[in-house]
Amino acid sequence: MIKILFYDTKSYDRESFDHVLSQYSDIQIKYFDADLDPITAALASGYDAVCAFVSSDVGKKTIQVLHKAGVKLVLMRCAGFNNVDLNAAEEYNIKVLRVPGYSPEAVAEHAMALALGVNRRLHKAYVKVRENDFSLQGLQGVNFHGKTAGIVGTGRIGAAMARICHGFGMKVIAYDVYENQDLKQFVTYTSLDDLLKKSDLVSLHCPLTDETRHMIDHDTIAKMKDGVILVNTSRGALVKTDDLIEGIRARKFFGVGLDVYEEEATNVFENRSNDILQHSTTARLLSFPNVMITSHQGFFTKEALTAIAEITLDNARTFQQGSRSANEVTA
């Protein structure tokens, strides 16, 4: 039997894991509302593993407390792991396993929804009609058919987005250090500079690393077409927010769709409707009429939640059996 303490669980987390838990009689789960950090990590005493999410603090201090509590495994119920100190985990002999491909189509479909939303000003149209304003001023968009989509990162999610764009009749170009051979029938690989120069839609689908942090900044924005649409459903820090705001103010972008953003750690999955977002770049972004922001919901489909639950518990079982998992991440 392996005992797992789940941190930062919402009702939908509990529903999805409880739905599949009957298939895992060798696993015992306890849910906890608070997120994982150096203080709450002490609550894991007596557990073999903890389950964390993209917003959790799994830094060195947290790893040290988990080690002291006897925890041997960190299960990330997400694809990203940039919030985990992998060097510390290795130092304290704590394994880290993630969920790399729960539903790439879910995120890719949301990326296209954001692209369509900001293009056709659906966020504005909804509010206008709700107020009995049926005029068309401020709602004009552009055809995607015949335009060029630039996909930055062609892993599973980027590949799914490339297929969607191709289905819309777009010319698809891509940049990735590792080219996806399955896409070459309809995708042309090029340099990042060339992609930015030619694309009418730029969609980001790469992990956050030291090399990709702030890859979209003042210099790369300057290389983009005037009137470009930018979509980010990957990691907030891929985009330097202050430079993005500068570009929006300079009317560089026709629209910007964001499901992730640099400040999301304090906002994501939380109800802040009664709060004033002081000194917030998120609030500044929300002030622009051509920007649409969602709360890191790209993954949030029934199918994806089921897959996350199953893969997470499969990871726990694999660890318990002493087998090596392809989903393990190391420094």
Image (tube, rainbow, N blue to C red):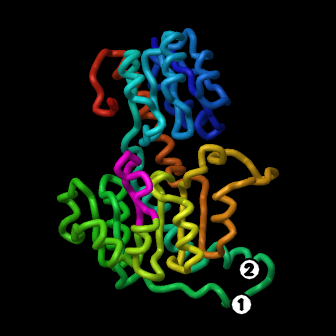
Which residue in the structure is indicated by mark 1? 135
- The three-letter amino acid code for the residue at tag 2 is Lys
19 left or right, relative to 164: right
Percent across and percent down for residue 226 are 45, 82
Q: Tell me where residue 86 sits by quadrant.
A: top left
What secondary structure do most residues of the magenta stretch adopt?
loop
50 left or right, relative to 268: left
Taking the spot 52% from the left edge, 65% from the top edge, the residue there is: 243
Screen quadrant of the N terminus: top left
Q: In this view of the protein, which residue sits in the foreground, 217 or 261? A: 217
Specify whether residue 216 is painted magenta.
yes
Taking the spot 21% from the left edge, 58% from the top edge, the residue there is: 179
**Rendered view: 166 above or below 312:** below
Q: Which structural element holds mark 2?
A: helix
CA gap, disc 2 to disc 1? 8 Å
The disc placed on residue 127 is none
Percent across and percent down for residue 9 are 62, 33
Q: Which structural element holds mark 1?
A: loop
Where does the magenta region start and end? Answer: 203-217
Which residue in the structure is indicated by mark 2? 128
Mark 2–mark 1 contact, CB under 8 Å? yes
Q: Tell me where residue 203 sits by quadrant.
A: bottom left
- The three-letter amino acid code for the residue at tag 1 is Ser
Percent across and percent down for residue 248 are 56, 73
Taking the spot 34% from the left edge, 65% from the top edge, the residue there is: 151
Which comes before the other along the chain, label 2 or label 1? 2
Q: In this view of the protein, which residue sits in the foreground, 71 or 322? A: 71
**Rendered view: 145 above or below 213:** below
Taking the spot 45% from the left edge, 28% from the top edge, the residue there is: 75
Q: Tell me where residue 250 sits by quadrant.
A: bottom right
